[in-house]
Image (cartoon, coloured by chain):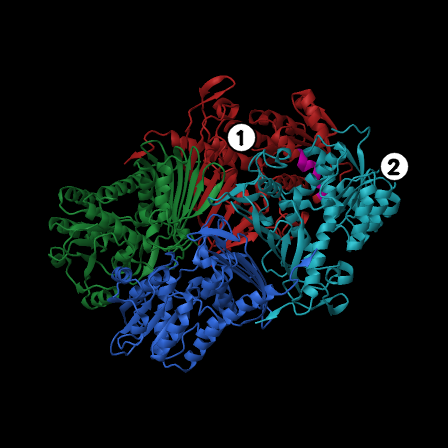
Chain colours: A green, B blue, C cyan, D red
Amino acid sequence: MSENPRPLGVAVIGYSFMGKAHSNAWRNVGAFYPDTPPVVQQVLVGRDPAAVKAAADRYGWAESATDWADVVGRDDIDIVDICAPGHLHADIALAALAAGKHVLVEKPLANSVAESEAMVAAAATATGRSMIGFNYRRVPALALARQVIAEGRIGTVRQVRAAYLQDWLSNATAPMTWRLRREQAGSGALGDLGSHVVDQLHHLLGEQVVCARGHLQTFVTERVGDAGREPVTVDDAAWATLETASGVVASVEVSRMATGRKNRMSLEIYGSEGALTFDLERLNELGIDDGTGLRRVLVTEESHPYLAAWWPPGHTLGWDHTFTSQAADLLTAISNDVAPSPSFADGLAVQRVLAAIEASDARAGTCVDV
Amino acid sequence: MSENPRPLGVAVIGYSFMGKAHSNAWRNVGAFYPDTPPVVQQVLVGRDPAAVKAAADRYGWAESATDWADVVGRDDIDIVDICAPGHLHADIALAALAAGKHVLVEKPLANSVAESEAMVAAAATATGRSMIGFNYRRVPALALARQVIAEGRIGTVRQVRAAYLQDWLSNATAPMTWRLRREQAGSGALGDLGSHVVDQLHHLLGEQVVCARGHLQTFVTERVGDAGREPVTVDDAAWATLETASGVVASVEVSRMATGRKNRMSLEIYGSEGALTFDLERLNELGIDDGTGLRRVLVTEESHPYLAAWWPPGHTLGWDHTFTSQAADLLTAISNDVAPSPSFADGLAVQRVLAAIEASDARAGTCVDV
Amino acid sequence: MSENPRPLGVAVIGYSFMGKAHSNAWRNVGAFYPDTPPVVQQVLVGRDPAAVKAAADRYGWAESATDWADVVGRDDIDIVDICAPGHLHADIALAALAAGKHVLVEKPLANSVAESEAMVAAAATATGRSMIGFNYRRVPALALARQVIAEGRIGTVRQVRAAYLQDWLSNATAPMTWRLRREQAGSGALGDLGSHVVDQLHHLLGEQVVCARGHLQTFVTERVGDAGREPVTVDDAAWATLETASGVVASVEVSRMATGRKNRMSLEIYGSEGALTFDLERLNELGIDDGTGLRRVLVTEESHPYLAAWWPPGHTLGWDHTFTSQAADLLTAISNDVAPSPSFADGLAVQRVLAAIEASDARAGTCVDV
Amino acid sequence: MSENPRPLGVAVIGYSFMGKAHSNAWRNVGAFYPDTPPVVQQVLVGRDPAAVKAAADRYGWAESATDWADVVGRDDIDIVDICAPGHLHADIALAALAAGKHVLVEKPLANSVAESEAMVAAAATATGRSMIGFNYRRVPALALARQVIAEGRIGTVRQVRAAYLQDWLSNATAPMTWRLRREQAGSGALGDLGSHVVDQLHHLLGEQVVCARGHLQTFVTERVGDAGREPVTVDDAAWATLETASGVVASVEVSRMATGRKNRMSLEIYGSEGALTFDLERLNELGIDDGTGLRRVLVTEESHPYLAAWWPPGHTLGWDHTFTSQAADLLTAISNDVAPSPSFADGLAVQRVLAAIEASDARAGTCVDV
């Protein structure tokens, strides 16, 4: 229970897709998690004054602003929530931490390992709390999966088969966008989708990946956009075989070309005494096999993670509820004066794994002739 | 686009499960449906002053009140949203309509056909708009199903196989509650779950049930509650075979004893040229068979009903989003000065079907000896 | 273990669909069930001499014949297996029993209750053994389901939701056939598909249906065949709500108009402590819910019913294997000098239930107006 | 239609699991494929005289023998079907081909690439026909998948996600067997399961894998058998990323440690305009996505590959039916005087891919440190 004299002032930087999702979280967190410290939606920040003003009105913000640098130091702002493009993450986060604010950064932590390392260093000495927004840690089924594994109910985990499959680039006439330029996006499917999968490995297994084999592929090498035809410089799909400290082997496949798959993050976790399965397109369900067959568990019971805050059994949650629970977890950590999880270091760990995958692919003679 | 000089003032009567769900809808409707007239969460009404005050604070209401009669006539209230127990629906709705307010009533319309008829009569001459809250009409997959049928894509519908299965009474030691007393609850599984199914038949088929065969059963005839052991006077499960005006035959099975089923409203609709399937536990999906096999369609595309308001493809919705879309539909109807749907008459039609099922069951010699 | 001095001689009467399936069983039973008494495929009987000769050669029979009356009394015949049309069942069975043969009759036992009663009476005093061919009792998953229920693992069964859905009449231009004339086929979907479902109820629950409510419907009332346009005089679909001696309520829905369903006998069995699910289109699987969620069990383990005779775990069986196991069960009963199961009386019991469903439907004012 | 003066005499070498499956095929092929040349089950060969005699009697063979060398040259033998252990394949096949016989060899073609090459060379100049037994090419759903791809219905294939998962070694106390010794088994999961997957890639895509990345892992490095504790010298699981001549990337994961998976060969094939999915545990089904969602097709229609030989729509096949269809395909090729498919060269191609995967894994520094 918070003893703050006033509600925590929140600023969100960015007002498009992620800004909308995070705004929704701040607007609703108090209704579902009444024991968290109260917040006020103070200011929404974006570059286009009219557009950000309209978004602020729509999403319930008291005001809007166009310059994040003006906002992150304001006395009425306690939490800076960064939904801006990845190349701005480091600058904003470092400024906000320097100003003593709590900081939530959407994934990826930054576009480079170097920037991420600087953020981790800053977070270590800051007075404010810091957190990275791997929202899928708040999918109740995945939080339950972590519990089941930690309790040893599937024995020793040996093998994980993971994928994150989408299809929005499957059509070769899908237009060129900034997301397909390496200098702007940093990475393609590997960074966008693979980061979620690698974080889940760390989250579910409670240990880190230590080495990686991988391959990246661009199937459609040129696309036509507003600037005419230009090369695609990021990967359409990527594959990796990862090993953890304890010897778990995890296969990872990510793609934006998997025709018919919309948002299929699929996990199969095989242990010595059981198994778990999950599919993000059916995020209210967890498959649990305790050695007698795969049970489909509808993760909507009051006893399941996060569910006591929401609705009665059988009343399912959607994708956006994960952000509300994420906000609640951050507020609880602030209130309890403990480090939120996942940390900036967790974000850096993911990026290092992705970098190792790319390094593996870049070696000469990677593919052995038949 | 609304031209109201001020936001529409909303009062919700009731603050438990349904009050929480409706509050959530009013708090969020503007963020997702920005073209609806703006609303203000004016007052939350309940009998316990402290409890309703706490709920009002939590759920974003400007104030709370304990007497609905004081509230429904207030000048700053434009919409009265009734989430109170069913036996109060008629009184509140009639008063609110008399005061010229728009009225949204949670299902069931009322506890008796007579009350429902009075409400339909009042709605017919009122200046305010009226609507019944069959929220599952706003499940995007079910709205899409209605479109698919209306467009003739599965040909002439002949046969519907429907069920609504829960299991919260499966354990014979589950305690006695007011929901299991006929004088308070009016009905058991038939009214609670069957009403949703019958409304979906009307919604999906675009026509009404005209006759009914049915059977009701109470498997556990006594339970122990706070008042000791007492008889269960409502049905645990019910079955019906219904016929529509055009000759569709629909089977309906509802139960609170279907062990393992949490909220499974399952629909199979067979037409001369195709079929549809749906399961509420997987509410983002619709099965569409156009004669070549059952396709699983993830109903999250921008072109699907309601989805343009929400998130990109593959980002699923939950149960509560249906209430937000319901509020949007009511506001749009008010703004456009047209009758919202479903109407009080739609609610009455459902109750008449349920009454016919009970009448069928009550006849002598219903079951023919083998 | 048999001590017969010579292999048992088998005659199959009929050589079309069922004759092919039963021939396959007799040809293979010894290879998979080596402890059953040996058999010899002696004679295949049919009316068309050339066609039955060709079928006999193809299916491994020593000879063919055209008159069943000549065959059923032959000294080298021990088992008469009747796959002829239903209206011939009684005559052949009575003759074979009178000649002291063991008799296997494909379902239905006969086309009328009266004929069936005569067959039951004859079987009671015959020296040969008699059995009815409800082959789905030999689906390993359904045999396992019976075990699970008998062991009390799902508690007291209360509610069964059953269907048998096909679609070969869904197209209104599907031609008229003898199967759609009441005088020849006796019944439509109810007799053809409902008989299997009712027998499964008796088999799985270990008790009998005692009363029935029902409705039959013909959606396409005329079809065009070789004889031009004529009325369809059997049901396309039927619905029933059945009650057993102990108070289980079972809903049954059968249809030949369920577009997209090919052979979907679907069972959901709800008990006080668990549930079972089954779908004939996935006949190697049984859903078992022991109260913690529905487990999908691949019924291919050596410990599962019938499986020790077949292949290692994970190597699935098909529809036709049930007939081979049925033949083995008959042979084992003969060898052990015990009554095979299911008996002619079991076949009669099913027909009485179907008759009660029709009687229920025939009553005046069956459907109560809304 | 064959014009052979007498039925083709068949000898099967081996009488355990595969010998049983192949015997079943020869016993039944004529009943289901009457247009193939007739065969006679002449002789079953095995080392233990009593055991092979008993098996021959059970499985329908005219005689048994203990020395394959005596059998393969007999005048009354036309087809030699080799189900013996892999290290005997080359010797038997070379002798049979030298004797002018048609030869069917169970997969793998041989235990080494060198032996396989010798077999391919011998087959090229032999008068008899030769075939390798990749029976899953005769799963109707997979034969249909090949058709769908060849017809361009899913566009250009880009990405395949494949796995073959079993769990019989999941328990660390499962005993040591010869299958886990490299010198006897040649390989572990990679050879046993990966060979099926790689052959399916070649079969479905109609082109060959040209390079491979891979990793093999032994999770349980010692097991206790009859000879006490000894090291496991083959892989428990393996992973590969393969590329075909046209640029398809296929991921392959095989394991004997995937708890709960019994025989799950799972394929997902993503093309530019659609996708296919398959799971061997549900071998009667094919998922077909033509861009509008994944349709579940029950592959039991008369128009589907192989189905005209079997049962009416909706009547499913099992695992063993593939061997019967394989025998029919071999007989048809012999009758038509054409080369059967898959050929010995197809078997060799698979082994070269497996060898490349092992070579990839054996390189120093395979896994890049994070």
Report the chain holding disc 1: D
Residue at the top extreme, as displayed: D227
Q: Given the image, on which type of amino acid does mark 2 rest?
A: Asp
* Circles 1 and 2 on the same subunit: no
User: Which quadrant is the C terminus of chain A positioned in?
Assistant: top left
State the residue in front, B184 or B132. B184
User: Is C365 above or below relative to C237?
Assistant: below
The circle on residue C204 is: none
Where is residue D140? Give x, y as percent.
59, 47
Left or right of D129: which side holds C117?
right
Residue at the front extreme, as displayed: B228
Q: Given the image, on which type of amino acid does mark 1 rest?
A: Glu
Q: Which image quarter: residue C331?
A: top right
Question: Is any part of residue D35 visible from this angle?
Answer: no
State the residue in front, B364 or D105. B364
User: Is A128 above or below relative to B237?
Assistant: above
Q: Secondary structure at mark 2?
A: loop
Residue of label 2? C75
Residue of label 1? D117
Report the chain holding disc 2: C
Question: Residue visible at 78% across and 51% down?
Answer: C116
Chain part drawn in magenta: D23-31
User: Is C333 above or below relative to A195?
Assistant: above
